[in-house]
Amino acid sequence: MNVLVLTGAGISAESGIPTFRGADGLWEGHSITDVATPEGFERDPKLVHRFYNLRRRRLLEPDIQPNDAHVALADFEAEHRRAGRGDFLIVTQNIDDLHVRAGSQNVLPMHGELLKARCMLTDEVFDWTTDLGVDTPYPTDPGNDRIRGCLRPHVVWFGEMPIGLDAIATAASRADVFLAIGTSGLVYPASGIVGQTDTLCRRIEINLDDTPASPAFDETIRGKATQCVPEVLS
Ligand code: BJW
């Protein structure tokens, strides 16, 4: 049985990481499209760096930990793997590292990773745990002023191509079970993955509320991820 899981901000909400489109969906009066577009970054890189610096600092605070939903997915994958039951992949839209911290092995972060920075000239990706700024020196050549300011968060903004789309399409076409957890289904192409699954695939949505994608699922489970995910996987 091949299992494909898609996660969104809702799975990390109970770990203390705010969602994008909930009641706190605006950040200091800026919409997500102000701070998550290449145009927004070009217009005001300091603002965009501040947005991601604050989120990176918060992610590294000790109270931010994987919750029961992250752990249930990791435990399920370990057992699935041990018993040789088939493929298991988590495609996450989240840029936090909570699936990996929970012990998940096969995770594809389609919208990038907050704890990485990317050089805009070479596309080289670096592990990154401190603040980024317009003057951040290039990590492998700190003395070289010529290439200062070329680092950006390794995340996927609106209008940019998400990561791993071919692998996602393959996993969707092979999936026997597709589980979408805590995503509003408003952002393409993640919202279209359910439509890439085979007609025989069992599609299950877990969310606090209905979403525009709900009609595409065979089963919709309403409730908190920390409660519903362990139940569904037990
Ligand atoms: C709980 C819970 C609990 C809460 N338990 N549940 C017009 C029409 C259609 C498409 C487009 C259009 N104009 C432009 C587009 C394309 C655009 C897009 O989709 N825009 C829409 C807004 C309209 N997409 C893109 O630009 C993408 N690239 C692209 O299309 O490239 C071209 C291409 C691709 C493929 C083939 C061909 C061409 C890129 C999208 C990048 C999105 N980036 C962001 C920022 C990432 C970095 C960062 O984190 O800052 O990704 S935006 C933001 O939204 C972030 C998220 O990953 C993403 C999805 O949000 P998510 O996870 O669903 O969170 P919320 O907050 O929306 O929902 C939370 C849900 O959880 C809610 O439903 C709650 O009910 C639930 N919940 N607590 C269970 N405890």
Image: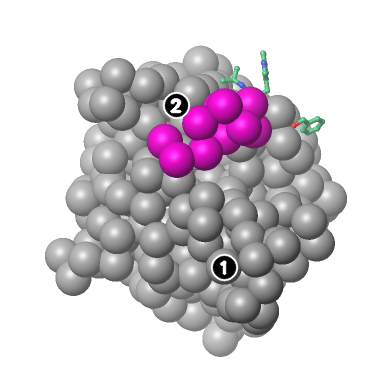
- Identify the residue shown where x is 42% and y is 70%: 129
The residue most toward the bottom is: 82
Q: Position of residue 122 (x, y in %)?
A: 80, 62
- Identify the residue shown where x is 53% and y is 46%: 93
The residue most toward the left is: 63
Classify 18 as above or below 89: above
Mark 1 residue type: Pro
In the structure shown, which secondary structural element does the residue marked by tag 1 occupy? loop
Q: Residues within 10 Å of mark 2 (few under 14, many from 20)?
A: some
Per the image, the residue denoted by label 1 is 137
Is residue 173 within the magenta segment? no
Classify 63 as above or below 5: below
Q: Is residue 218 visible?
A: no
Coloring scheme used = one colour
Q: Position of residue 197 (x, y in %)?
A: 73, 39
Q: Is residue 10 visible?
A: yes
In the structure shown, which secondary structural element does the residue marked by tag 2 occupy? helix
Magenta-drawn segment: 38-47
State yes or no: Cβ of the residue under disc 2 lies below 8 Å from any atom of ligand 1. yes
Q: Residues within 10 Å of mark 1 (few under 14, many from 20)?
A: some
Per the image, the residue denoted by label 2 is 32
